[in-house]
Image: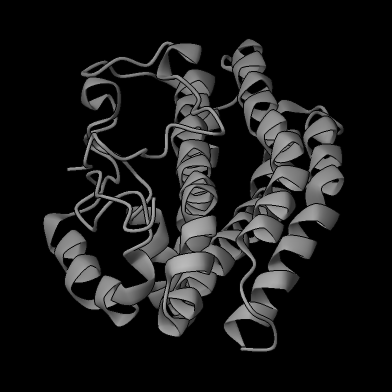
């Protein structure tokens, strides 16, 4: 469990409360509310991940070894790849299907425009960490924080707005099964992604290591919904491949808070 004497990752960027979608521990939601709740969960994973980078950037840069800096750069870089991957799946699979099933062609256009709004800042952040992890430049914690603070206000606003958009789709619950759309499209994307060793070893562990099962009295204790054997394989195989990267993550491979080594 995280050491309460050290700052953890509830900030600087605020997590999205489950109350936004009406989610509570032990309740079963359906339709648009269920989709919005799952999106809150995923977006909080992204927010925790970047908060961990933000919290540790200065100390890794000033106190860390060369290996610490390279591992940290790889961790921060994989976060940006995860954001790109998440939004690519939305743009190519989930959003088009929602438009098709609701019969409203431009229903997700505002969210697509928001993707464009933070793309340049995210790419700049990613390019810098590419240089650091490849040894072309030294890690500068203050510069990294500036890059984060350049993109995150826009990205964070989008992460909140997208949940509101999904909640507004409740009006279509009687004509299409939005929960099925989401699960089918995500399922297809994940089945394809799992064939890629880069996804299995680089992105999947980041998702596990940024999900907090204890958050808000365990409201998302049962996530991710997969057999225990699969969970064990992920923890013992994929999370170990780059274990040195995930020591900077907010949670361990069992999805519970861990101490940030450079907070």
Q: Is residue 196 visible?
A: no
Residue 200, how many percent across, how many down?
A: 39, 74
Q: Is residue 155 visible?
A: yes
| Residue in the image at 41% along x and 60% along y | 206
Q: Quadrant of the N terminus?
A: top left
In the rendered image, the vertical position of residue 75 relative to residue 211, given as above or below: below
Residue 93, how many percent across, how many down?
A: 66, 52
Residue 43, how many percent across, how many down?
A: 53, 38
Q: Closer to the camera, 224 or 83?
A: 83
Q: Closer to the camera, 112 or 29?
A: 112
| Residue in the image at 53% along x and 26% along y | 36
Q: Closer to the camera, 7 or 15?
A: 7
Judged from this view, the residue extending furthest toward the front is 62
Q: Seen in the image, is 94 located left or right of residue 113?
A: left
Q: Where on the picture, by quarter, is residue 10?
A: top left
Q: Where on the picture, by quarter, is residue 7?
A: top left
- Colouring chosen for the image of the structure: one colour
Residue 161, how many percent across, how many down?
A: 69, 25
Q: Where on the picture, by quarter, is residue 181?
A: top right
| Residue in the image at 30% along x and 46% along y | 224
In the rendered image, the vertical position of residue 81 relative to residue 51, given as above or below: below
Judged from this view, the residue extending furthest toward the bottom is 135
Q: Closer to the camera, 241 or 64?
A: 64
Q: Seen in the image, is 43 located left or right of residue 211?
A: right
| Residue in the image at 31% along x and 81% along y | 241
**Number of numbered discs overlaid on the protein picture:** 0
């Amino acid at each position: 469990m995280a050491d309460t004497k050290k700052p953890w990752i509830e900030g600087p960027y605020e997590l999205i409360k489950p109350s936004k979608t009406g989610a509570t521990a032990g309740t079963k939601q359906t339709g648009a509310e269920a989709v919005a709740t799952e999106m809150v969960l995923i977006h909080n994973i992204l927010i925790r991940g970047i908060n961990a980078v933000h919290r540790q950037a200065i100390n890794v840069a000033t106190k860390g070894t060369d290996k610490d800096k390279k591992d940290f750069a790889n961790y921060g870089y994989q976060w940006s790849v995860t954001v790109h991957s998440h939004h690519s799946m939305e743009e190519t699979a989930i959003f088009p299907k929602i438009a098709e099933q609701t019969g409203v062609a431009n229903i997700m256009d505002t969210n697509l425009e928001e993707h464009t709004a933070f793309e340049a800042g995210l790419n700049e952040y990613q390019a810098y960490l590419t240089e650091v992890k490849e040894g072309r430049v030294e890690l500068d914690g203050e510069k990294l924080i500036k890059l984060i603070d350049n993109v995150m206000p826009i990205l964070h606003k989008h992460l909140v707005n997208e949940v509101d958009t999904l909640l507004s789709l409740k009006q279509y619950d009687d004509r299409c099964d939005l929960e099925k759309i989401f699960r089918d499209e995500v399922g297809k994307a994940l089945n394809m992604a799992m064939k890629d060793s880069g996804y299995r070893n680089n992105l999947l562990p980041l998702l596990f290591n940024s999900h907090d099962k204890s958050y808000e009295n365990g409201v998302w204790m049962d996530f991710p919904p997969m057999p225990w054997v699969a969970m064990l394989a992920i923890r013992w195989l994929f999370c170990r491949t780059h274990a040195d990267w995930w020591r900077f993550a907010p949670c361990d491979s069992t999805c519970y808070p861990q101490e940030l080594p450079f907070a």
